Amino acid sequence: LEEMRQRVVKAVLALAVTTLISLLFTDRIMQALLLPAGGIRPIFLRPTEMFLTYMRVGLITGIALSMPVIVYQLMRFLAPGLKPSEKKYLYLFVPAATGFFVAGAAFAYFVMLPFALNYLLTFGSDLVEAKWAIGEYISFITSLILWVGIAFETPLIIFFMAKLRIVNAKKLSGYRKYAYVGAFIIAAIITPTPDPFNQTMVAVPIILLYELGIILARFA
């Protein structure tokens, strides 16, 4: 319990520091989050909406920046219960998980969002004028980036499941057709637009990540 308390305190301190640093650069972060919208200027409808949005962006950015420290503290807490051969894979998990998440977030920001936002912006534009609320816009953007980033952790999860002998490459290959269907279902949930183009744009990387997971499972 004392070990857990120390690890939690360190994780919370890391989150507090990164959140405070993020709040100093919230203006620039907000400008970056508005870029995929293609120049549209959102509005705020409640007196506190803009303030709360600033706090939300600062906190989310702080969580993202402190996540390696949080995961590291978790790994250090679990390490004493593992064999030496298992520990080396545990310490690989932190940089690998960070790398896969960053790749997914970059894919969502640079590839998915421009197409998705353009579709949503032009849909029904002959009837109404688009005026997006800043709170809803930021919530939408950050949620999409978060879930796509998590989806990109698929190969890493498969690798560690294979190391634990829960799955193997042969079994994963046999489930391939179900995985492909599942990829399109997940894409339909993640993507904000109903058109098949954006759904396919999300489903194909998930399928490729699953295939990469099969390759990693062979090494595992």
Image (cartoon, rainbow, N blue to C red):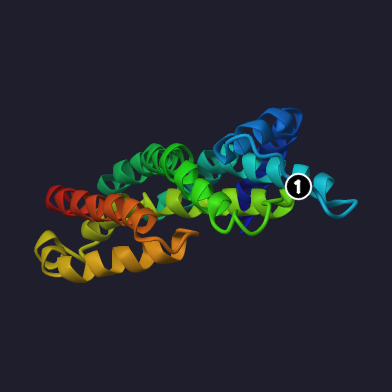
Viewer-proximal residue among 52 and 161 = 52
Viewer-proximal residue among 39 and 207 = 39
- Residue in the picture at 75% in, 28% down: 24
- Residue in the picture at 76% in, 47% down: 53
Quadrant hosting residue 214: bottom left
Viewer-proximal residue among 5 and 141 = 141
Specify the farthest residue to the front. 126
Residue 50: image location, x then y, percent: 81, 45
- Residue in the picture at 30% in, 54% down: 206
Number of marks present in the image shown: 1
85 displayed left or right of 145: left
Assess disc 1: are there few (<14), some (14-19) or many (≥20) residues with their C-alpha within 10 Å of its C-alpha. many
Residue 36: image location, x then y, percent: 55, 38
Viewer-proximal residue among 63 and 12 = 63
- Residue in the picture at 29% in, 68% down: 182
Residue 25: image location, x then y, percent: 71, 28
Position of the N terminus, as image quadrant, is bottom right
Specify the farthest residue to the right. 47
Is residue 145 visible in the rendered structure shown here?
no
Could you tell me which secondary element the residue under label 1 belongs to?
helix
Q: Name the residue under label 1.
A: 53
Quadrant hosting residue 23: top right
> Mark 1 is on which residue type?
Thr
Residue 140: image location, x then y, percent: 60, 54
Q: In this view, does 66 lie above or below 150?
A: above
Is residue 151 visible in the rendered structure shown here?
yes
110 displayed left or right of 69: left
